Amino acid sequence: MKWRSLEESSPATDIRPLHEIYAERKESIAKYAPAATQKVHAQAVAELKQRNLAANILPVGAQAPDFQLQNHDGKLIRSSDLMVKERLVLCFIRGRWCPFCVGQMEAMSLIFPQIEQAGATLAAISPQTGKQSYFMHDQHKLKFPLLSDTGNKVARQFRLTYRVPAAQEAIYRRAFVNLPFTNGDDSWELPIPATYIIDRDGGILYASANEDYTDRPEPAEIARFLRATIKR
């Protein structure tokens, strides 16, 4: 199945809300994916929700950990390098193989000018290798850095990680979602998608995560939060 990027959509739909883009992708999944496959994914999400992972992420008011990761061009980036403005919007995603991650990243790229105007910058973190991050950045023409979190070390500090259930792993293998190749390790570990806004002093101002990878904050919501909290 080929997932249509925002650039391939008509100009009238380029600025659709993210939930509308996701609804279209969910409709395609419901139409084309076998019912048994859909059931496995739904069960995996339900199990994560039962574990209540999203309620235990690093919360608002906590101090974000310092980190250093390679970006999509292989350059070492420190968290302090990203704090050149007053705030940092930091998205944790699963990888370029995930159509919902792609949709979110394209949508965030579209509002990147608004993020900058609000005195903030943007970066995304995934466990995928630098080569996969390069392909994603290039293919989708993203305007912000993609950082490779090898072994989910940073995601684990934000309390976002989980091990893909065996039944879902089998589905991914059949669909050629080879996480050991994509991520460069055999852990079959992923972060639940999350979005943070971090103040220049490292304090977390906004935190949103969801065990359901098909449900993420609207980019417009992030932009509104940034505008409402501009330091005068």
Image: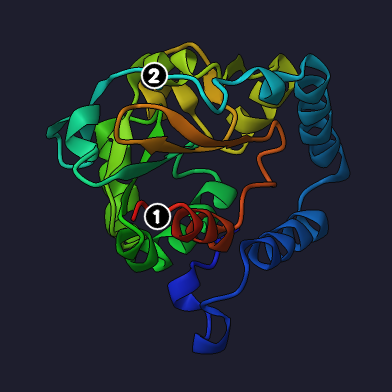
State the residue in front, 99 or 115.
115
Q: Please say whether residue 78 is visible from this viewpoint.
A: no
Structural crowding at the residue carrying mark 1, measured as other residues with C-alpha within 10 Å and reported as few (<14), some (14–19) or many (≥20): few
Question: What is the quadrant of the C terminus in the image?
Answer: bottom left
Instruction: Return the x and y of residue 200 as percentages of the image width and height.
Output: 30, 35
Mark 2: secondary structure: helix
Q: Which mark is residue 154?
A: 2
The answer to which quarter of the image holds residue 198 is top left
Helix, strand or loop status at disc 1: loop
Q: Residue at x 38, y 34 (%)?
A: 125
Residue 20's x, y, as percent? 69, 67
Report whether 32 appears left or right of 74. right
Question: Where residue 161 is drawn, which disc sits there?
Answer: none
Nearer the observer, 133 or 79: 79
Residue occupying the point 45% across, 12% down = 186
Q: Nearer the viewer, mark 1 or mark 2?
A: 1
Residue 61 in the figure: left or right of residue 124? right
Q: Which mark is residue 230?
A: 1
Q: Amino acid at mark 2?
A: Val
CA distance for labels 1 and 2: 27 Å
Q: Residue at x 70, y 17 (%)?
A: 165
**Residue 218 seen anywhere in this rendered image of the structure:** yes
Q: For residue 37, which quarter of the picture?
A: top right
